Each structure stands twice: as structure tokens, then as C-alpha cells.
Image (tube, rainbow, N blue to C red):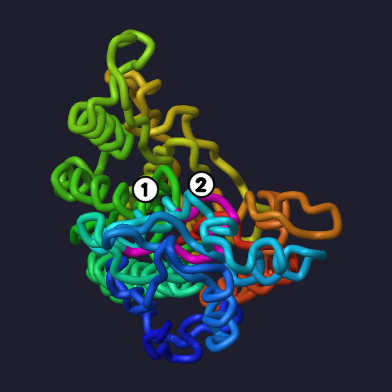
Amino acid sequence: MNIMPIHKAALVSTSYSGRHDTAQSTRELLIEVEPVTSAATNETVFQIFKAQEQLISLPVVEDGRPIGLINRHIFMESLARPFHREIYLRKSCIAFMDKQPLIVEADLSIEDLSFRVLSDGKKVLTDGFIIVKDGTYLGLGLAQDMLSAIAHLQAEKNRLVMESIDYGSIIQRSLSRASREAMREHLIDHFLIWEPRDVVSGDFYYFQHFGDGFIAVLFDCTGHGVPGAFMTLIMSAFLHGTINAQSCRNPGALIAEINRKVKVAMGQLDHGQDTGAEGHSDDGMDAAFCWFDATTRRLTYAGAHMPLMLMLPQTQGITVIDGDRHGVGYASTPMTQTWQNHEMVLPEGTAVYLFTDGIFDQLGGDKRIAFGKRRVRACLTEHAGRPMPEQRQALLAALAEYQGNEPRKDDISALGFRV
């Protein structure tokens, strides 16, 4: 029997030709192999395998429809057993045929094919699979071609996702450009740390000057990466829709208003009171809001799980003012929740610091424990006399040394300024 010419690499189970890496459907994995019928003897199959050394499997077809698949290795091993050649050589080839090979339609997607291959077990990895069109035999497919196509598809999907995330980072940075420019204009001595863990961040910052003072906001939304970035867009929208020249002077009331808007918009009521609903979200943010009145030098701060740190001039330590123990927008936070304003008059030269918890919670050191507020305070105290940009560098250097080879745990953000 004559066998249709086949590219040598196409049927070698240990080598991949690279021709199918862009395949979208099973048809694109097709290798045309002339089948035999059940009338063919094992001697005929033996001669075919002998002539085609790269052929790993041979389909058996009746009336155009596949009925089995003969694996080269199993066939040759069987004939090599004592007396098997004498007994079976002139008998029908179905004696060594797999009667239940994997048979798939040509229009099956590569992803669906991969599930079929996995469900059929290890034999498909060595035997390959039969490709048909409406049940009619077309040819063979190899598992390694499918795996390469799957890897290529996955790589392409990852590339598209990463391109989208990278562009999302550009959008996220663009949204905060006005705040950065306003800080450079109105804060003579300041630093900003904004380091996403995963390209885009769940941390965000806001700064706006109102002539007689300014408001500075730092917030840390649920999660990091893409989910966190989505939350920053939501929170930023509510912040921009709420803040004005009057509301900014009352940070506690500003946080309360944003809390109400988030809970209503996202349906984040008390889940314990709504046992029949499913698929609840429970997302929100920790935040610090600061209004500084330049005329009176009065700072008004309100915080949700986020502290305020102060370094007063001619002092030796950091003063920490803790925020309230309620996050913003979460299902467990009441709609009527209020946040306390803390007011203080700051002498000239006072340094003000806001941190998200990413830097505090970063693991490192010999004991793999959190960096913590104590180390942050110690670093700030040590470098208190230096300009804010130098304090930033010292703080990041201390964190990097402590972190060592530990992976970054969360987004890291901080804002420091001197008034």
C-alpha cells in the first residue's frame, strides 16, 4: 500500500515543526495520513511502519469513517513477542488497534480540543488524535502541535492583556497629573511615592490648591492591580464630584459623603440584612484627608484606617494621629457613619506625612516580619533635617534593604510635605 508523502517532522513525537503555533482550530493541526482498512493485515501495517519511520500512528477507516488507531510503538512491541509474528502477521490489523481513539471535528477550537485531550488521558499524548469533518476521516493531529498552539494563544492573550494594563497605567498617571503639577507649584518642599505592585495601582492621591489653603488626599482601595485600579477610578470620580472650595474644609464630612455615594452606587448595604441576595461586592478604601489653611496655619485631618504623622520643628520624634476604625464604602460601614476631624495649628517648618499600609506591611528582615510603623518613624526621625526628596530616597532605600528578596506585597504610596 502506498502512503501519502508526509513532512518528516510532522509525525515525530519528540520534535515540533513550528507550523501550527498560530492555529485557531483543529483543522489547522491537520496532518494528512493515508489510512488502512480493517482488511489490511498486520504484515501490511508492518511494512508501512517500516517504510515510514517517522509515522507514530496509523488510522483505520471503514467507508470513510475512522474506527481505530494503531500506535507504532505498541504494534512493534507486540509483534516482537515470542510467536506473535507467526500468529498475527497475516491477521487483520484490528488485532492491535485502539478501538476508542480520540476523534474530533475539524472545526473544534484549539481550547475545546485541549479539554478533550485532557479528558482522554495520556494515550492521546503518544498516539495523537483523528480529525474528521462531519464524521468523515480527514487526517491526524498531534498533541505536541496542540500544546504549542495553546502556548502561543496563551502568550498572545497575555500580550494583549499586558498592553491593556500598560495603557491603563498611562491613563491612571494622567488622571493624577493635575495633582502632581499643583504639588510642585504650591508645596516648596515635598515628596511623593507611588509604586504600584502590578503596573496599575489600588492607591491614589489627590491635591488641590484653593487660594487660602489646600487639600491633600491619599487613599488605598481594596486590592491591587486591575481590580484596585478600577476602584481608584470609582473613588476618584466620587471625590471630584464631591469636593469644592467649601467641602474641602471639612475632611470628616467629605469622607462621610463619599461613603454614602459608594454604598449607594455599588449596592454595598449591610449584607447581614439581605440574606437573599447573591454576588455582593464589598469594596471600599482606607483614606487620609487633610485641609491646610495657610492663613491660620490650621491643619484639619480626618482618616479612615490611615494615620497622620507629624514632625514638629525642634522635636526629636514623630507624632502619630490615628484615623477612625471604619473604612469608606464597605458593606459593614454604616450609611450614617461619621469621621472625626482632628485640628491643630502647625508651626512653620512642620513636616506632614501620609502613608498607605503597603510600606508598613511589607515583609522582610531575618524574621520575615512587617517593616512596620516603628521603622518608618525611625527613618523619618533620622533624616528629619534633610529636604523631603532626600527623605524619600532614604525611606525607599531602607525599605529595599529590609525587603531583600521578598516579593512586593502591596502597592506602596506616601505623601510628605513641609508647611
Q: Secondary structure at mark 1?
A: strand
Q: Residues within 10 Å of mark 1 (few under 14, many from 20)?
A: many
**Residue 337 lies within the magenta run:** no
Specify the amino acid type for callout 2. Leu
Left-right relation of 177 to 354: left
In magenta segment, residue 118: yes
Q: In the image, residue 135 lies at what x, y percent?
A: 25, 55
Q: Which numbered dot is residue 290?
A: 1
Query: Predominant secondary structure in magenta?
Result: helix
Residue 214 lies, in percent from the top left, at: 28, 57
Q: Quadrant of the C terminus?
A: bottom left
Q: CA distance from mark 1 to mark 2?
A: 9 Å
Q: Is residue 319 above or below residue 323?
A: below
Q: Tell me whether the residue at label 1 lies in contact with that at label 2, contact meaning CB atoms closer than 8 angstroms.
A: yes
Residue at horizontal 46 percent and vertical 52 percent from the top? 346
Crowd rating for badge 2 (residues with CA inside 10 Å; few <14, some 14–19, many 20+): many
What residue does disc 2 label? 308
Q: Is residue 365 visible?
A: yes
The residue closer to the viewer here, 388 or 406, is 406
Give the magenta part as a residue range.
117-131
